Image (cartoon, rainbow, N blue to C red):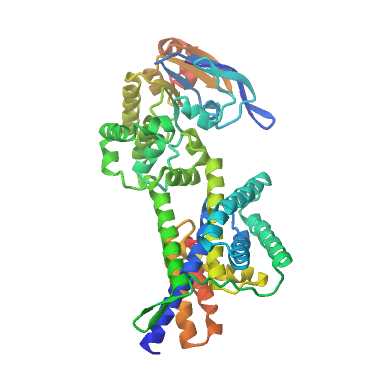
Amino acid sequence: MLKADAVCVGYGEALALSNISFDLGPGELVAIIGPNGAGKTTLVNALARLLPIRSGGILLDGENIARLTPQQLADRGVAIIPEGRRLFTSMTVEENLELGCYRAAARAHKREGLEQAYAMFPILGERRRQISGTLSGGQQQMVAFARALMARPRLLLIDEPSLGLAPVIIKQVFETIARIHATGVSILLIEQNATKALEAAQRAYVLDCGQMIASGTPDELRQRPEIGAAYLGHGH
Amino acid sequence: MSATLFGQSVLSGIFAGSLYALMGLGMSLSWRYLRVINIAHFGLVFLAAYMTYEFAGVRGFSALAVALLLIPLFFMLGVIQQVLILRFNVNEFSSLIVTYGLAIIAEAVIQLIWSADFVRYENRALHGNVEVGTLLLPMADILLVVIAVGLCVATWAAMRFTWLGKALRAGLDNPAIAAAFGVPNQRLLLLVSGFSAALAAVAGVFVALLYTLAPSQILSWLGVVFAAVLLGGLGNPLGLLAAGMLIGVSEAITMAVTAPSWAPVVPFTILILLLVLWPQRV
């Protein structure tokens, strides 16, 4: 479904990502793990077309999307749950969700989408008139998830969903990801919390210093000593 | 002060305040959503006023027809102005200087075509008055209040309830993420600049209906409209309407109890108090 081929992204002279290749099949949940500063968020922003790509191709169902605008990408059914939530903080919870289905194809499903979102996250239904910037971090993450689901995505890009959240909330976040995945949505999960990400994913890639250094199933990756030591905290 | 004088002062304050709000609406929107402090707005207002004078007054076309032609024309002018502002990367504070320059150009163009002399457009259809008890309400002023209140309320409702308004607010909060959900930020901003210039056209028609025109007066509205825009809150049409009325009525009462020359003290006193006591509002 999604295939990146030798993607390079750079800020000025420096390359933030060099020769990144990976693929994600329909309905698959693939994780990209790696330490802080590895280039994970740069990769998400490049995939979402929020950053220019210097070279390489990104194929979505065979179409090269490397030069599309973010709006054109949204029209192709890709939605993002960005790092740090990045809600429309001066707007209400419900307005945030409505913006999720802004594009013409999704608008028709607004009412149904809101009902599903409030069924999934009842607290958001109670707080639909509250300004989203005043919610707790966990609730803001729920809004970010619900907003993306309002777009009825085929492919969901989830960037660091556990960042800055308490362990009990992180557990809920990963349960939510599993529920969304069970409905058939393909998911690319970018996550620093490698332990959690490998529990959730079917396959994973390891990104470090702007390069893909390993890939495989979670079990394979866990068994590789250098990965376990560096990213999973196994030690020795 | 007699009740009639007081009542008439309040009324004339409401009329003036409506015009402040009508002139300020486009400014307020472009300041908030485009980050352009658009002094050229006043140039457009007077250009529309002079065109109303020329086509409805001198050449005898119907004022309504002129207004309906000016609105799309000015919409285009607003879009062109914003395209240039984006093209040359003009930021919020340099926009103050750039658009001031545009206002000066507008003044020069008006002076070139219509001379520096005063001109006056007499509209017979709106010449009459409505009498309510001892109070006198000119028809043109009544129309002004209706249009100004109508446009402010409609703009507020559009920003609050429509897809367009929500997309604009989302784009202001977080343009990249709004784009990722399909919001065409750039096109919406051009729409705002076009709409704001179209509002300048509407305000201009009323300036022509109500005032004697001279090119030197273009920037005489600047201070009071600025005060109303800031007091009302940027991009807040209902706040602007209330602020315009407050300033208009305070000015009118000041004029009635002291002398007309004291009127300009009012908006600036309010503005200074606002900046001192409630700076986060601005």
Check the image and report above or below for A219 versus B47. Answer: above
The one nearer the camera, B46 or A221, is B46
- Indicate the position of residue A130 as horizontal and vertical percent values: 33, 47
- Indicate the position of residue B19 as horizontal and vertical percent values: 50, 68
Query: Is residue B190 at all visible to an observer of this figure?
Result: yes
Q: What residue is rendered at 51% in x and 60% in y? A: B64
- Indicate the position of residue B130 as horizontal and vertical percent values: 39, 76
Going by the image, does B176 lie left or right of A182? right
The one nearer the camera, A195 or B252, is B252
- Indicate the position of residue B96 as horizontal and vertical percent values: 64, 59
Q: What residue is rendered at 71% in x and 67% in y? A: B111
Query: Is residue B243 at all visible to an observer of this figure?
Result: no
Check the image and report above or below for B62 versus A164. Answer: below
Check the image and report above or below for A220 versus B210. Answer: above
The one nearer the camera, B116 or B160, is B116
Q: What residue is rendered at 37% in x and 43% in y? A: A95
Q: Quadrant of the N terminus of chain B?
A: bottom left
The outermost residue toward the bottom is B1
